[in-house]
Amino acid sequence: MSKESRFFEQVDNDMLVQMVMDGFRRIIVHYGAWFAEVAHQVGLEKAMEVENNVWQASIGNQVDRLGKTLGFPTDNGLPSALLGLPRETLVDLIEKLSINWLANDGIWFQAVEKQFGMGDAKRCNDTCWTRFSPFEATRIKKLLNLPQNGGIPALKKALAFRMYAFINEQSMEDVGDNCIIFYMNNCRVQAARKRKGLPDYPCKSAGMVEYPTFASTIDSRIVTECVGCPPDEHPDKWFCAWKFTLEA
């Protein structure tokens, strides 16, 4: 009997289930640690290129390996059951994933705030956006096959595919051929605070990272201007607004 077999004989099924879930957790954290360190060593743009290659090489093998163990069929590295889901279920799944993403972000913020204070939490949050916002823009560009310099039309398409877009209410106003104003009409985070009688969360510092880096990743010629974002005063019809202009 192998040493590994003797080990597994010592734990019950509940522990094995916990180990399975912890395995997924370790993969996620290790994947993120690699991405963060590569970005630190060679720059974010090159790190995103590497990450794309890693994902293409890794995800299919991982899914196929799990499929063999768990008994679900796969098709080109994707679970066949996922490919067979009806459209409305896929849309609902995307919404739930987006809510999970936002909830995870909020839990991280609150955990850091509780232990280290609001200042450190905001600093960590803003820094995370320096990586996530251009990463999300890059993923959307690839998913939609947007051109390298697609201008305002490409930005409008990309803004509609952010994770925020699936759970918040947003709109865009055409100012001209090369300029739009983007409105976050209803924000889940701010709306929840409003229901609790709390003031707006002052998210402008994060927005000043989030929106300019997203827009410039879609097209480096796009300049971002904050029209208003908490703690700024704003009308009831939107929480924040951003002006995007394509400069020649």
Image (spheres, helix red, strand yellow):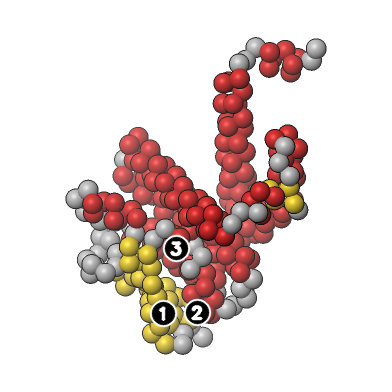
Mark nearer the viewer, 1 or 3: 3
Seen at 38% across and 79% down, the residue is 173
Which numbered marker is on residue 235? none
At label 3, counting other C-alpha atoms closer than 10 Å, the crowd grade (few under 14, some 14-19, many 20 or more) is: some
Quarter of the image with the N terminus is top right
Label 2 secondary element: helix
Dot 1 falls on a residue whose secondary structure is strand
Q: Amino acid at mark 2?
A: Ile
Element at label 3: helix
Using residue 111 as the reference point, say whether residue 40 is left or right of it.
right
What is the number of the mark on residue 180? 1
Instruction: Give the label on residue 152, or none.
Output: 2
Q: Does the image show residue 42?
A: no
Labels 1 and 2 touching (C-beta < 8 A): yes
Amino acid of disc 3: Ala
The residue at 67%/59% (across/down) is 49
Residue indicated by mark 3? 165
Question: Looking at the picture, does residue 33 appear above or below residue 221?
Answer: above
Query: Looking at the image, which is closer to me, 173 or 75?
Result: 75
Q: Position of residue 157 (x, y in %)?
A: 52, 73
Look at label 1 and name its amino acid: Ile
Separation of marks 3 and 2 at Cα, in angstroms: 17 Å
Q: Is residue 28 above or below residue 140?
A: above
Residue lying furthest bottom in this view? 177
- Residue 192's spot in the image, x, y percent? 29, 51
Q: Up-down: is 208 above or below 227?
A: above
**Image side of residue 92 versus residue 54, left or right:** left
Query: Residue 172 falls in which quadrant of the image?
Result: bottom left
Which residue is the extreme one toward the left?
197
Residue nearest the viewer, comparing 5 with 115: 5
